[in-house]
Amino acid sequence: MYLGVDYYPEHWDIDLMDSDLTRMVEMGVNTIRIGEFAWHMMESTEGKYNFTFFDNVIKKAKEYGLKVIFGTPTATFPAWLSKAHPSILSEDIDGRKRVFGGRRQYCFNSNIYRQYTRKIVEQLISHYRDEQAIIAWQIDNELGHEGSDLCYCDQCRGAFQKFLQDKYKTIENLNDTYGTIFWGQTYNSFDEIPIPKKTITSHNPSLQLDYARFRDYSINSYAKMQIDIVRKLKGEQQEVTHNFYGGFFDKCFNQKTMAQGLDFVSYDNYPVWGGLKEPLSPASIAMTHDYARGLKNKNYWIVEQLMGAQGHTVIGYLPRPNQAKMWSYQAMAHGCSNILFFRWRGMNKGAEQYCLGIIDQNNRTSRKYYEAEEFFKDISQYEELVNSEIKSEVAVLYCFDNIWSWKAQPQSSEFDFTNELVRLYTPFHNLNVNMDVQSVDCDFSKYKVLILPVMNIIEKSLAERLEKFTENGGIVIFSFRTGIKDENNNLYLGSVFPGYVQKLCGIEIEESESLQASQEIEILGQGTFENTIGTGKVWRDMISTTTAKVLFKYTDKFYSEKAAITCNNYGAGKVYYVGSGVDEDTLNIIAESIIKQADMQFEKTQSGVEVVFRKVHDIQHKFVINHNEYEVIYEGSTLKAYEVKII
Ligand code: GLA
Ligand code: ZN
């Protein structure tokens, strides 16, 4: 089990290294990640490569018995490069060139940048290919993060037009698919097509979806270029990874594509960052781990585990004593098997002065150090357990085309895709059901329950796969605005919503309403949910049933005969349609009934107590995680605030 910290020895006087490494080893560190932003140290002027500094760092690390993950430094190019070649700088949606000074301001479609990337990466990997202490190469850093997924420069416009020509072949085909007849936007040639910078009101929805796909293609092709170089030159003892970030559904970057080229996925776990007044919910954090695990369907690393409060210009909530340690256990519970804390010591200069680590700028050995030490000491006893496979009977399915369709047209000012996915994930998490978070094109036949949050785009082929799943006894849960669009981001003409899954759901939707901030509507339980009162936000579909049963209906004037939540028997299975952003209490009740119907392993726990089931050698283990700031009693024993027990 690799346990360690992110270490930037270049940030301080090199004389600090011995005492740093000594304290790290005492803390239980056996691995450090280095190098990921140090391009200038390796190439201080063009073509003058020098790895002496990192040769010494690695030599010293080996004296202390440490393994090394080395990051390629392409997230932060040197100033001399952008001065010599300003065309590498990306452009924002207003056409403003990003300037040197932050990070990741390069354009993924800059051929010049790709040439310089190739050179530094070839030099770096060749230099260290035989270094036994280096166990993995990390490609760049959080590709696409902090707004770097989007670029609107002329290089990207040209590449975008080529991307479209390769896809549509003829301009007539594009015009027809996009419906450019609307607003007289018919193109005569591909070079007339704009990159969707700011315009008056909004761009064509098909163009916007293709632009998102183009961004994803741009990032993934840049990543593949680097991965190919590393694979060609690296030692066979060295693996290849990349560190993905939270907020992954907000980006025009399908990380699963990149993950296919990696030996293992790495994830950066920041349950709270920047000016948040409180951390993400336990379910929201758990979901990110299930997503990271699902990228390659295997255990993953965390190469940046938050321990100290973090932020660039604004910081926020201070993780309470043992809370970040608890989050580290939660990560291991959900499939992380190797973990590094971000960062050894906070840097006193530069843009991340407030991104605190294990040791603060006072250089004292304090609370956070001892928490990390205790965590390493304890978790290192469970190597087999944390490497065991997680078996889930529930899968939450996402599709980036669908997410990007919503990104272009949120339809409600209150809409946020991740919130809507977590809305359906949370009730099952509350009942401690193991879940996978998977791309919709996975083989989902092995699951008992499929959850498809706000799946706007459903083509016939997906509908048929879902019909087969349900006929065989599966349970499917949809939420609002399901199946209204095709893969070109166009509404279906001539078919009633929810389109291809209309028969599967046993409903028809002719009218809907977008709900804005502070708007919520009441829904009333029927049948087994008699007298249960719930609420809906964000959106509501006015559902009429054909073969489905009404579970909840609206109560307001004009719509009290319309259903809000329905359930349809289909084959040996069932299909639920949740036609609004329904509250957690109501969904908890429905989730419990589904879990019992499907006869799935679950456990009722008090609020804030998370249980994750794991099995190794047929012996069942449970991670019992107290997310509460107060102690709780679990099966007769006390868990202190933020305490975790492995039973
Ligand atoms: C991200 C980056 C790190 C650092 C942290 C700060 O995860 O990967 O380089 O900027 O955020 O929280
Ligand atoms: Zn660009």
Image (tube, rainbow, N blue to C red):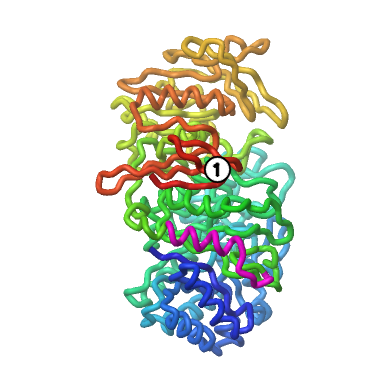
Q: Which residues are magenta?
A: 361-378
Residue 575 lies left or right of residue 288; in this view the side is left
Residue 339 lies left or right of residue 314; in this view the side is left
Amino acid under label 1? Answer: His
Residue 456 lies left or right of residue 155; in this view the side is left
From the top left corner, tell me how far across and down residue 244 is, in percent.
51, 58
Q: Quadrant of residue 62?
A: bottom left
Residue at point 58% right, 83% down? 41
**In this rendering, does residue 168 appear at all?**
no
From the top left corner, tell me how far across and down residue 3 is, in percent.
44, 65
Quadrant of picture, ligand 1? bottom right
Q: Nearer the viewer, residue 72 or 304?
A: 304
Q: The residue tagged with tag 1: helix, strand or loop?
A: loop
Residue at point 40% right, 27% down? 595
* Magenta region, main secondary structure: helix
Q: Nearer the viewer, residue 531 or 186?
A: 531
Q: Residue tagged by mark 1?
A: 627
From the top left corner, tell me how far across and down residue 554 is, in percent.
60, 15
Position of residue 606 relative to residue 270, above or below, is above
Position of residue 568 relative to residue 439, above or below, is above
For label 1, the crowd category at 10 Å Cα-Cα, with few meaning under 14, some 14 to 19 and many 20 or more, is many
